[in-house]
Image (cartoon, rainbow, N blue to C red):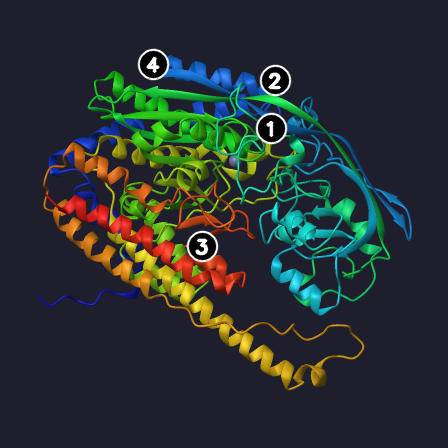
Amino acid sequence: MQIKTPSIRWAFIISLIPISSLSIAQQPLFGFDTEGSEEQRRLEAEFDTHIDRAEMDRWLREFSSEAHHVGSTKGKQNAQAIAALFRSWNYDVEIAEYEVLFPEPRTRELELVSPNRFTASLIEDAVAGDASTSNIDELLPPYNAFSIGGEVEGELVFVNYGTPADYEMLERYGISVAGKIAISKYGGSWRGIKPKLAAEKGAIGTLIYSDPADDGYGPGDVYPEGPYKNDSGVQRGSVMDMPTYPGDVLTPGVGATGDVGRLNREDAPTITQIPVLPISYRDALPLLEAMGGDVVPEQWRGGLPITYHLGPGPARVRLKLEFDWNMVTAYNVIARMEGSQFPDQWVIRGNHHDGWNHGAADPVSGLVAMLSEAKALSRLAQAGNAPARTVIYAAWDAEEPGLIGSTEWAEHHGAELQEHAVAYLNTDGNGRGFVNVGGSHVLERFFNQVMADVQDPQTGVSVQERRRANLRINAGSEKIRNEAKNRSDLRISPLGSGSDYTPFLQHLGIASANMGFGGHSGGGSYHTMYDTYEHYSKWIDPGMVYGETLAQFAGRATLRLANAPRLPIDFQGFSDNVAAYIDEIETLAEDMRQQTETDNQNIKDGVYGIILDPTKSFGPPLAKAEVPYFNFAPLKNALTELESAAASYQDIASSGAPATARDNYLLYTSERELIRQQGLNGRPWYKHHIYAPGFYTGYGVKTIPGVREAIEQRQYDQVAGQIELAAEVLHNLATRVEELSGP
Ligand SMILES: [Zn+2]
């Protein structure tokens, strides 16, 4: 039959019909047979009727009515209130307590001592129309937790974002931070990297400020006229060296129960070497204005009405910090619903409950969606549809100072978690806009089906289609734009760090994911005193519309993992992503090799001497050792082995063969094959050999981290050994997958 070409207008309308929700809704669910899929979808429709936006909004208002960091009165009250809710829904509830080190600031002083004098206020102003900003009894003032105390005085050096690349640039200006105080912008890397790198370069102190070009009046109107950062807002946050290990600084690797052995604080390697303090752009302005020296490179300029200079000096500051190093109790709420068929297989679902402040967005917006989900799940159980596997809900304490509550619990229960945990599903603060899923790539296919089955409340298409459209238009590279068009599954991001999934994924080897919505709500309130109910309900997610969507999304993920007769774990998506990472690393090595060759040749030819401006002190790049060729064959051979095992298993899984108990055990413990007990080079706590937070990026992920970081850090003699180790974990996984296809 000849189909008449539709008019352009008609074609446009057709293109808006969500293709996936028409076709995939009829497909069986991954891990279920046709009949089971229908029953599961019926359950999910019933689940949705129990999600209540108004109730979420009430909880949001209640839990964020006061500051509730670990160790605060309100924090403990919230834990008890959350436990009471879970009990009222028939969960078995325990409050798991850990005794952990938590510094609170006693003295914070910052003054400019020359060429003129200025004393920084270091306070955030209450604003009209937001009563919460006047209700600050227990609010901790702006500080960076796990900065060391001390008093230092020195000249300022402007280091941009304080990343390794920024320090290379400073070297070309002949500027060192040795003996000086580095002043850095927030952004570009995780905040804890800034004092770590500054200390490695010899600095005696660090200041971090939020430049208005990044999340102040540059991108939009400031609070209370808009969501962005006003001139007194300061981002609090931890600066403990989480890429070495997260959790209680005194008890690495073990749960911080009352009687466990502890390090002396002086020996804790994750406390900073130098004092560090975050400040507002109002307090930063007079310091930056008093600086001299070269004008900063163009890309380093911020949004303040001054010419930015690199220093050193003549601006000279005195910084004094003192802390009370308290032992406080972290209260994790652990709520368990016993599985009706497989009680020894645990699906774990968590969101933290502590905030740096009132914490409406971070973390309560995610917490209340999880509570709504847990209530809906209990309603299904009451009606005779208890989950087949055990579901454990966790509301973590002390996430903000360094993933402390979740890490201590995961370390404390490590052995049983490695035996029983099917997966760990995390949420944190939520906003409106596009779905974001990061996680283990054995779950990529599973999450695509969840994305296709949840409707975006603003557009009516599936959240998968909305994300796909966004990537097709806005993704940073052509490769990603094309993939969004042509690859059937959207890629989920690999996980670095930044929330409570880290101990489960990277320490214990439990397949994990992190889920949320965002992209259409301004980000200036993060960790300031302005993260309040008033700010959230006006600017981030009015009416908890995306709170409901998150509950539907995370609820489906939890329920499907709990009920699927065959666990929906897929090794083809995993190996496809690993192949892409190996490509990336080869390209990285090649780009570094060419860049180094070009730079060295230009230095040798004296090219820089001809072009550089003699009135400026900017110099040529430093000559570097040539980048050798690496043999990636062991890694590629292991990948090939995995690809063929994954294809054989796929045949079995899609044949509809029922899964045995052994099959499911082999499936859910397969992620453990990707960890090695010895851990990564120089940081044994991190055991996963495919995903880790970057040693010099912090939250930012490094995939196949042993190999990638050895190349990036130019430790070329380590690369071959790291390739062998990464090949070994892939080979071990391939052997496991072959076992699944075997007799
Ligand atoms: Zn959070």
Element on which disc 1 rests: loop
Element on which disc 2 rests: helix
Q: Is residue 211 visible?
A: no
Q: Quadrant of residue 625?
A: bottom right
- Which residue bears the numbered disc 3? 706
Task: Confirm or reject: label 1 Cβ below 8 Å from ligand 1.
Answer: no
Amino acid beneath label 1: His
Are dots 3 and 1 in contact, CB under 8 Å? no
Question: Which of the image's four quarters has the C terminus?
Answer: top left
Q: Between tags 2 and 1, which lies in front?
A: 2
- Which residue bears the numbered disc 1? 358
Q: Earlier in the sequence, mark 2 or mark 3?
A: 2
Which mark identifies residue 238?
none
Categorize mark 2 by other alpha carbons within 10 Å: few (<14), some (14-19), many (20+): few
- Which residue bears the numbered disc 4? 90
Q: How many dots with numbers?
A: 4
